[in-house]
């Protein structure tokens, strides 16, 4: 079966984020960018499905500026077979991303679409569910285990109360949580090989999708900073402060 | 304006998060209806009717909603919500699952995890793990919103007298079925709404050592949480993870034990009123946000903490 994986280029998770002085956004100039960690988990899961003989082909898609091709190449080096780049320099919001992915799904007809549950920049946690709704597919969100059995996929989900397993008809959408797998690193020979794998570029217009953002960001500010407090000498002093100064116990 | 709040519950009890979401709805202003979708959830409907500020409770009681499957809830809420200006749900794993589906079915954007209401169309929400706070304006006619419960003081759960109406809308998308669940059983308070949280990190070394934290927690009526590292290592289950991609907590007192204070962890607890850090590394970033820091080996400090607490509590 064919698996489609969507990946997003985001700020590297180790980078300290700074808000721009004019409050229009965060400063991304000369900042290290990387594949969103949840998308790495999505790619890894697809590769494991291929290694198990469940998946036959892995197509990886990314939406965004030219530079996204770096993340597509990374996915190809990790084991994806071919890439699709939907190129745009405009801001793409979740609903629009879902519409773009829907048209890719209609063309490619994958049995399984795997996405990260959220991107660590906008922290929205929306695109996979929106794609599932637009394509009329079931969704296994926040997955910690994915088992394909015949025409169904069983997805164990990380939920507030613990774990929950659902069975979805295929084709289906899965969004990854942290415990699904531990992504591998790309080897040098595979990075070289990935350069020769096919990568198609297209625009939102090619897919018949007009970008029409519904949300506008009025301002972006730094969070209220917490003052570092005091160091206490021992546990007795700690308990005394909690009881008599902070009055929280 | 008319606002539809989707109740968070387990078919028998209304979860407190619903009262926080109603508070967010009140901040927007307008008539507030609550939709209770579930199976044999009549008692939840009665409880929701008592919440302060609620106009009407709609109960959709059907096996299709018993396990809160996103496909079915998505269709139901999109149908019922069409007539409202705002649809709100708590940003827990249930709301995060079905609400984007609702938004897509209505062809509108979703505003996730709001922390503040500026006006009927403008909301404040964290981005980049809370390292930046965005003010976002929605141009959609129906605003689909998930709410960070800890950011809104709950309305009173008693005193209201809303009418309760049964809804006869059955939406079974036929795309998914419930197979099973493994729910954590605990007599401790719910992590998301506990007044005190004691969390352990990689420094705890194993799951058994979490018993030390549980003993301290039980003395104070606290919930127990964890860092991602502690969950990944298998010390404790995933539902205990606090952080950017886990649970958001904002208790009166948060005690971080053997946790370094990575930004992804801070994103989940930095709105706590008082933060205590116990860590043997005085350079650990957690000390930059802690009101009270104790540089110590946790294996000595935590048993001492238990003894000291016994003296004063
Ligand atoms: C996409 C993504 C999402 C993430 N989401 C989350 C999230 O939601 N929540 C989260 O917590 N993390 C999250 N993380 C992980 C985060 O980056 C950190 O790796 C994690 O929080 C570290 O956990 P820790 O502090 O327990 O472990 P460490 O960073 O290893 O710190 C352990 C601490 O314990 C101290 N210690 C060790 N032994 C003792 C002792 N005997 N006595 C006292 N102190 C001791 C050490 O000094 C150290 O400071 C995420 C990461 C990514 C990439």
Image: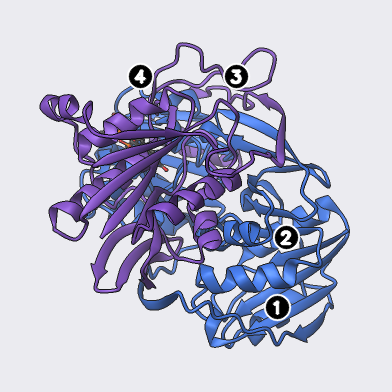
Distance (Cα) linking label 3 and label 4: 25 Å
Quick check: B64 above or below A134? below
- Write down the residue under mark 1: B47
* Measured Cα–Cα span from mark 2 to mark 3: 30 Å
Q: Residues within 10 Å of mark 1 (few under 14, many from 20)?
A: some
Dot 3: within a 10 Å radius of its alpha carbon, few (fewer than 14), some, or many (20 or more) residues?
Answer: some
Residue underneath mark 4? B283
Residue B206: x, y in percent? Answer: 21, 49
Asked which quadrant contains residue B61, the reply is bottom right
Q: Nearer the viewer, residue A65 or B209?
A: A65
SS for dot 1: helix
**Nearer-the-camera pick, A23 or B40:** A23
Which mark is on residue A19?
3
User: Do the residues bearing badges 1 and 3 touch, measured as CB atoms within 8 Å?
Assistant: no
Q: In the figure, what tint was chain B given?
A: blue
* Residue at the front extreme, as displayed: A206
The numbered mark, 2 or 1, whose residue comes first in the sequence reads 1
Percent position of residue B285, x then y: 41, 24
Residue drawn 23% across and 33% down? A197
Chain A: its colour in the image is purple
Separation of marks 2 and 1 at Cα, in angstroms:
20 Å
Numbered disc 2: secondary structure: strand
User: Which quadrant of the structure image shows residue A210?
Assistant: top right
**Badges 1 and 4, same chain:** yes
> Mark 4 or mark 2, which is nearer the start of the sequence?
2
Q: Tell which tag, 1 or 4, sits nearer the viewer.
A: 1
Whether label 3 touches label 4, CB < 8 Å:
no
- What distance separates the C-alpha of mark 2 from that of mark 4? 45 Å
Q: Is residue A196 left or right of residue B14?
A: left
Residue B87 disc label: 2
Are labels 2 and 4 on one chain?
yes
Q: Are marks 1 and 3 on the same chain?
A: no
């Amino acid at each position: 079966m064919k698996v489609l994986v969507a990946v997003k280029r985001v700020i590297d998770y180790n980078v300290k984020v700074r808000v721009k002085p004019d409050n229009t956004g965060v400063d991304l100039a000369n900042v290290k960018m990387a594949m969103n960690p949840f998308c790495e988990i999505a790619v890894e899961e697809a590769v494991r499905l291929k290694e198990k003989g469940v998946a036959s082909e892995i197509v990886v898609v990314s939406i965004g500026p030219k530079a996204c091709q770096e993340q597509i190449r990374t996915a190809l080096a990790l084991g994806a077979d071919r890439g699709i780049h939907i190129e745009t320099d405009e801001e793409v919001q979740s609903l629009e991303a879902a519409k773009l992915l829907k048209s890719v799904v209609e063309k490619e007809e994958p049995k399984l679409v795997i996405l990260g549950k959220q991107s660590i920049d906008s922290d929205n946690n929306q695109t996979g569910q929106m794609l599932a709704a637009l394509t009329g597919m079931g969704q296994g969100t926040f997955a910690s285990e994915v088992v394909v059995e015949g025409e169904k996929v069983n997805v164990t989900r990380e939920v507030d109360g613990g774990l929950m397993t659902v069975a979805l008809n295929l084709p289906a959408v899965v969004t990854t949580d942290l415990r699904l797998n531990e992504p591998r690193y790309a080897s040098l020979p595979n990075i070289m090989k990935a350069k020769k794998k096919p990568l198609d570029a297209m625009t939102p217009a090619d897919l018949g999708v007009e970008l029409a953002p519904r949300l506008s960001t009025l301002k972006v500010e730094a969070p209220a900073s917490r003052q570092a407090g005091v160091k206490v000498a021992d546990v007795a002093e700690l308990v005394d402060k909690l009881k008599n100064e902070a009055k929280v116990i | 304006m008319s606002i539809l709040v989707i109740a968070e519950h387990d078919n028998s009890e209304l979860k407190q998060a619903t009262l926080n979401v109603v508070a967010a709805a009140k901040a927007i202003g307008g008539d507030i209806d609550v939709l209770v979708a579930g199976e044999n959830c009549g008692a939840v409907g009665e409880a929701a009717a008592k919440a302060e500020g609620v106009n009407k409770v709609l109960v959709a009681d059907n096996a299709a909603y018993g396990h809160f499957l996103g496909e079915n809830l998505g269709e139901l809420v999109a149908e019922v919500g069409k007539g409202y200006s705002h649809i709100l749900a708590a940003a827990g794993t249930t709301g995060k699952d079905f609400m984007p589906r609702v938004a897509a079915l209505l062809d509108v954007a979703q505003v996730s995890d709001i922390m503040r209401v500026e006006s009927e169309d403008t909301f404040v929400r964290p981005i980049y793990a809370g390292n930046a706070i965005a003010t976002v304006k929605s141009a959609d006619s129906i605003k689909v919103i998930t709410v960070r419960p800890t950011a809104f003081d709950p309305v009173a759960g008693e005193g209201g007298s809303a009418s309760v109406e049964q809804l006869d809308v059955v939406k079974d998308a036929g795309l998914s079925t419930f197979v099973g669940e493994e729910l954590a059983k605990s007599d401790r308070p719910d992590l998301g709404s506990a007044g005190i949280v004691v969390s352990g990190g990689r420094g705890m070394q194993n799951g058994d050592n979490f018993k030390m934290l549980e003993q301290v927690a039980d003395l104070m009526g606290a919930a127990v949480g964890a860092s991602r590292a502690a969950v990944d290592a298998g010390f404790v289950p995933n539902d205990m993870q606090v952080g950017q991609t886990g649970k958001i907590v904002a208790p009166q007192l948060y005690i971080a034990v053997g946790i370094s204070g990575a930004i992804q962890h801070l994103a989940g607890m930095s709105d706590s009123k008082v933060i205590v850090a116990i860590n043997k590394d005085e350079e650990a970033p957690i000390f930059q946000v802690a009101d009270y820091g104790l540089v110590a080996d946790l294996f000595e400090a935590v048993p001492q903490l238990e003894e000291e607490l016994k003296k004063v509590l």
